[in-house]
Image (cartoon, helix red, strand yellow):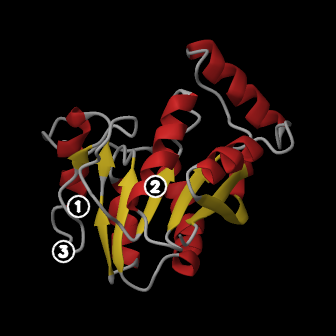
């Protein structure tokens, strides 16, 4: 909290990546519906994307209940953003039984692999056939890092927690297939990141 008692937190990377991500969201999200954001963090993405996608109803969430007031402070003036909820992807049921799309930025590498698996399982439960799970962040491809900076970042993550680390896209796609999701689109993004779109397979 700053000197003005403003609960909003800021992540400098958000301003750098929000416009490229929004461009992808416009191309892959349904025209309207509910988007559940996993690991909303500061809440800045929710505010920006909800403003840019006024027909979408945005549902922020975060593992940390303490993050909720800051997220809501960014979004309480926006009519298409719901109050944030605490959500642990590894624990079912989730606060929402259904959503038209899921968005998750920069989580699965700063969490154990079990969190990525929990996210995929949850997406398989609550998405409609064809509904997208959109992941943003760094990934390995073919077992290799896509840039030296990503390799250094991966080493720093694993030094902080051996269960963390940049995931291989093939491993994510394989785990997604087990729970009824298929890899649809991979978009190259700035700063050696990817936006990965998985979709629920029609049953």
Residue 19 sits in quarter: bottom right
Residue 146 sits in quarter: top right
- Viewer-nearest of labels 3 and 2? 2
Distance from the alpha carbon under mark 3 to that under mark 2: 25 Å
Distance from the alpha carbon under mark 2 to that under mark 1: 24 Å
Left or right: where 91 falls relative to 148: left
Which residue is identified by label 1?
Answer: 75
Which residue is identified by label 3?
Answer: 79
Eyeballing the image, is 109 above or below 29? above
Whether residues under marks 3 and 2 lie with C-beta atoms below 8 angstroms apart, the answer is: no
Left or right: where 77 falls relative to 96: left
Residue 145 sits in quarter: top right
Task: Mark 2: give few (<14), some (14-19) or many (20+) Cα within 10 Å.
Answer: many
Q: Earlier in the sequence, mark 3 or mark 2?
A: 3
The residue sitting at 14% across, 41% down in the picture is: 4
The image position of residue 11, as x and y in percent, is 43, 44
The residue sitting at 16% across, 62% down in the picture is: 76
Q: Mark number for residue 133?
A: none
Which residue is identified by label 2?
Answer: 123
Eyeballing the image, is 144 above or below 129? above
Q: Is residue 57 visible from the viewing direction of this image?
A: yes
The image position of residue 32, as x and y in percent, is 37, 83
The residue sitting at 32% across, 36% down in the picture is: 63
Disc 2 element? helix
């Amino acid at each position: 909290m700053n000197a003005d008692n403003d609960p909003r937190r800021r992540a400098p990377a958000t301003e750098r990546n929000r416009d490229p991500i929004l461009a992808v969201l416009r191309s892959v999200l349904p025209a309207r519906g509910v988007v559940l954001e996993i690991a909303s963090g500061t809440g800045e993405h929710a505010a920006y994307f909800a403003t840019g996608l006024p027909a979408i109803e945005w549902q922020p969430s975060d593992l940390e209940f303490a993050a909720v007031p800051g997220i809501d402070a960014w979004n309480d003036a926006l009519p298409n953003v719901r109050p944030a909820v605490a959500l642990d992807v590894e624990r079912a049921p989730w606060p929402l039984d259904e959503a038209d799309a899921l968005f998750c930025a920069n989580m699965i590498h700063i969490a154990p692999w079990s969190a990525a698996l929990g996210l995929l399982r949850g997406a398989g439960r609550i998405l409609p056939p064809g509904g997208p799970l959109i992941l943003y962040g760094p990934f390995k491809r073919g077992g290799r890092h896509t840039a030296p900076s990503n390799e250094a970042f991966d080493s720093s993550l694993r030094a902080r927690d051996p269960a963390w680390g940049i995931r291989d896209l093939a491993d994510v796609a394989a785990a997604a297939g087990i729970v009824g999701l298929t890899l649809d689109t991979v978009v190259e993004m700035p700063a050696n990141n990817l936006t990965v779109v998985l979709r629920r397979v029609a049953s």
